[in-house]
Image (cartoon, helix red, strand yellow):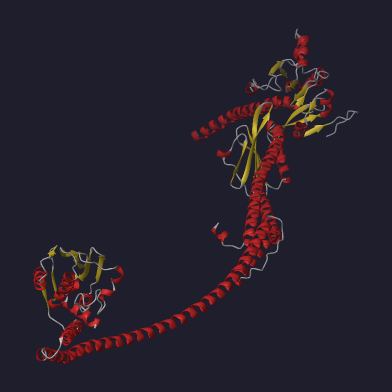
């Protein structure tokens, strides 16, 4: 079957039909031959038996009257039948009574073969025995032997005729098959051809030609329909592809534009950054210049101021009796204004010193430092300063942290308007930083002034009421921010204010280098 | 002399003995011949058809009669119990006509002879051949003999010896006259067939 599978449909069809035809023919031929042989044998047996019967009938008298010559003559009649090779008559005692040979050497029937009646095929002969019965008494036996070679020759003849017929029939069947197989194979072959064309050239516009209304026709219809659908899909696909290409082009263009924009933007940003850096640089140098300027100004202004003060003191001492009351008052006013001027300059100097002057960082135990500061301030007896919480040990410049606490505490004491002043110092440990608080029950600050108070030279009350330079909180803010902390105030007018400031643990807790870097960047 | 005497004795013996030996040999050959003839007689009944009135359906036997001096001896022994045409065969022996005429039972004997199907007329009856044949002429009896000129005398079958073989000859006209039908197979075997012309002349 596997051989069949690899054949073309045409050959397959032909092979199958031819195989069936030849099988049928051969079978018929074989049956015919077998039948023929059988018939031949039967006929031969029948005819030979009939002959034997006749001989037996005609030999009765000869046997009865022992006339061998007559029996022989009877047997001679056998010569009309050429296939009979030998015939003989046996008497009652199974002795040869009369014989007949035809052109052959003497053929003896072996005594063991002798029998009363029946037949046997042996040695290329058919031997038939018939008893000779006279009046119910067996008086002898006829034996006839027929040569089978004529029969075999005849059968051979028949076989060759049958084979010839078979070959001829096969040839005719082959011719008919090779013509008629086209009815089935041609539509399939054309379909296959179309399918090949379609698959090779991708040409979906080809159509198979329908030739019949059978299953193959259905197949072709289905195939054509399929092709149509494929063609349709193909067209759609091409369309979609084109659309896609257009879209891709659009997108590419958009992207290019966006990219250009981005490049421009980046360039702009870079420019801006450069400008920023430049500005920063300018700012830094300006800042530095300002710092230097402040220092120089305050330092240099101090000298003429000191001269003015000395002169004023001299006038006040030396011309006291020459001046009238008004003169002395004005001289005193002058002296106080000079002092204020001096304080202002000192404040500026202080401010400018923050960040400019560096100090070694040491471990500062606030629990020791803060009480010292309180002592230094020496608050009046009406004001109590309490340390609410345990204060930590921090690493920082001792002078600065002293300045922070001193300024905040002295502010609280300075502006206290209550008879029983309460100032408390607190500290919370938060995540990553310390939060310190200094709370008082003083006059409080209006909310709109919360930012203003940290600006330089800003005081909320007139200078004549409370002697203040307006520099202290500015310095505090600068120090706290230098350490990376924040400072703010919470207050209610009439109830008091609380100043909070934070110090990051890392910055103040240990790493010197970072601290340094942050200081440098802030300059 | 003594030798002469001896030879004489031998010769004398030979002279005496030879005829005796020949006689013995002759006897044996004769008995064999009659055995065959007996078998032939028996077989004749198979190849000859008698008219119906002679062969009733009844179980009456086929009678083979032997008239005259019986030469068969016990030659009929082998065929004694063999039936022919469904009937048993019996052999009856009759005295010659000459003797019969003297006999007191002449009439019943003749009747018995006429009842025979086959009558073998012995050589002893050679003188009375014609009379014997005439006796059974109208009774469908198959007359058989082994005498020369038997057929010419109106007999039906006659045995002859040919090359020491027993053969026979048939007179078809006589058979017809006796209303007997002799089958062709038997006729074929006959050495000579005699047909009498109406005028009575012989023809072979």
Q: Quadrant of residue B48?
A: top right
User: Is A389 in front, or is B116?
Assistant: A389
In the image, residue A67 sits, relative to residue B81, either above or below, namely below
User: Is A355 in front, or is B38?
Assistant: A355
In the image, residue B192 sits, relative to residue A21, either above or below, namely above
In the image, residue A318 sits, relative to residue B80, either above or below, namely below
Q: Quadrant of residue A380?
A: bottom left
Indicate the position of residue A174 as horizontal and vertical percent values.
Answer: 68, 60
Q: Quadrant of residue A134?
A: top right
Indicate the position of residue A271 as horizontal and vertical percent values.
Answer: 38, 86
Q: Is residue B90 visible?
A: yes
User: Is B58 in front, or is A326?
Assistant: A326
Q: How many marks?
A: 0
- Identity of the residue drawn at 33% across and 86% down: A279
Direction from residue A164 to residue A337 in the image, left or right: left
Question: Considering the image in quadrants, where does the N terminus of chain A appear?
Answer: bottom right
- Identity of the residue drawn at 52% across and 79% down: A253
Indicate the position of residue A260 as horizontal and vertical percent values.
Answer: 47, 82
Indicate the position of residue A447 as horizontal and vertical percent values.
Answer: 30, 68
Question: Considering the image in quadrants, where does the C terminus of chain A appear?
Answer: bottom left
- Identity of the residue drawn at 69% across and 26% down: A135
Given the current orientation, which residue lies at the most extreme right position?
B199
User: Is A265 in front, or is A351?
Assistant: A351
Q: Is residue A356 visible?
A: no
């Amino acid at each position: 079957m596997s051989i069949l599978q690899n054949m073309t449909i045409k050959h397959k069809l032909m092979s199958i039909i031819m195989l069936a035809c030849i099988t049928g023919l051969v079978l018929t031929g074989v049956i015919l031959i077998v039948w023929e042989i059988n018939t031949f044998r039967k006929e031969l047996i029948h005819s030979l038996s009939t002959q034997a019967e006749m001989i037996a009938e005609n030999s009765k008298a000869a046997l009865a009257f022992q006339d061998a010559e007559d029996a022989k003559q009877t047997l001679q009649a056998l010569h009309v039948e050429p296939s009979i090779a030998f015939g003989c008559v046996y008497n009652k005692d199974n002795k040869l009574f009369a014989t007949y040979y035809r052109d052959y050497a003497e053929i003896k029937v072996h005594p063991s073969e002798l029998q009363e009646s029946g037949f046997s095929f042996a040695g290329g002969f058919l031997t038939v025995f018939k008893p000779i019965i006279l009046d119910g008494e067996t008086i002898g036996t006829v034996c006839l032997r027929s040569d089978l070679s004529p029969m075999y020759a005849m059968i051979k003849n028949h076989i060759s005729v049958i084979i010839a017929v078979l070959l001829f029939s096969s040839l005719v069947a082959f011719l008919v098959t090779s013509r008629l197989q086209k009815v089935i194979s041609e539509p399939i072959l054309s379909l296959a051809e179309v399918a090949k064309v379609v698959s090779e050239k991708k040409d979906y516009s080809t159509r198979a030609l329908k030739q019949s209304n059978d299953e193959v026709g259905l197949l072709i219809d289905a195939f054509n329909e399929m092709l149509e659908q494929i063609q349709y899909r193909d067209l759609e696909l091409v369309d979609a592809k084109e659309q896609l290409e257009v879209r891709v082009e659009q997108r590419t263009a958009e992207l290019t534009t966006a990219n250009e924009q981005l490049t421009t933007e980046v360039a702009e940003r870079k420019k801006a950054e450069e400008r920023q850096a430049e500005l920063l640089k300018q700012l830094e140098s300006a800042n530095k210049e300002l710092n230097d300027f402040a220092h120089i100004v305050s330092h240099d202004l101090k000298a003429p101021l000191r001269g003015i003060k000395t002169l004023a003191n001299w006038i006040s001492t030396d011309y006291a009796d020459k001046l009238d009351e008004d003169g002395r008052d004005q001289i005193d006013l002058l002296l106080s204004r000079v002092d204020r001027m001096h304080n202002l300059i000192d404040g500026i100097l202080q401010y400018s010193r923050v960040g400019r002057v560096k100090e070694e960082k040491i471990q500062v135990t606030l629990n020791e430092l803060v009480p010292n500061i309180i002592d230094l301030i020496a608050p009046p007896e009406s004001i109590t300063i309490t340390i609410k919480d345990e204060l930590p040990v921090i690493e920082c410049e001792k002078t600065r942290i002293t300045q922070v606490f001193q300024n905040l505490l002295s502010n609280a004491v300075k502006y206290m308007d209550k008879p029983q002043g309460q100032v408390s110092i607190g500290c919370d440990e938060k995540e990553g930083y310390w939060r310190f608080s200094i709370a008082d029950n003083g006059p409080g600050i209006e909310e709109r002034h919360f930012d203003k108070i940290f600006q330089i030279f800003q005081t909320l009350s007139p200078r004549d009421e409370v002697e203040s330079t307006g520099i202290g909180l500015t310095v505090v803010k600068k120090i706290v921010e230098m350490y990376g902390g924040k400072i703010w105030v919470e207050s209610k007018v009439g109830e008091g204010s609380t100043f909070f400031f934070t110090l990051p643990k890392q910055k103040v807790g240990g790493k010197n280098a970072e601290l340094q870097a942050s200081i440098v960047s802030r300059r | 002399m003594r030798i002469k005497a001896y030879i004489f004795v031998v010769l004398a013996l030979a002279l005496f003995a030879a005829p005796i030996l020949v006689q013995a040999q002759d006897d044996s050959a004769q008995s064999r011949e009659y055995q065959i003839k007996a078998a032939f007689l028996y077989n004749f009944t198979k190849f000859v058809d008698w008219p119906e009135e002679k062969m009733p359906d009844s179980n009456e036997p086929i009678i083979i009669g032997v008239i005259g001096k019986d030469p068969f001896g016990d030659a009929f022994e082998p065929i004694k119990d063999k039936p022919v045409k469904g009937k048993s065969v019996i052999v009856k022996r009759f005295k010659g006509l000459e003797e019969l005429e003297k006999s007191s039972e002449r009439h019943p004997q003749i009747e018995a002879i006429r009842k025979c199907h086959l009558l073998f007329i012995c050589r002893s009856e050679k003188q009375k051949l014609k009379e014997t044949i005439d006796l059974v002429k109208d009774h469908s009896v198959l007359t058989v003999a082994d005498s020369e000129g038997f057929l010419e005398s109106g007999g039906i079958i006659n045995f002859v010896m040919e090359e020491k073989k027993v053969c026979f000859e048939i007179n078809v006209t006589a058979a017809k006259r006796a209303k007997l039908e002799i089958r062709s197979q038997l006729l074929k075997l006959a050495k000579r067939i005699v047909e009498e012309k109406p005028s009575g002349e012989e023809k072979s």
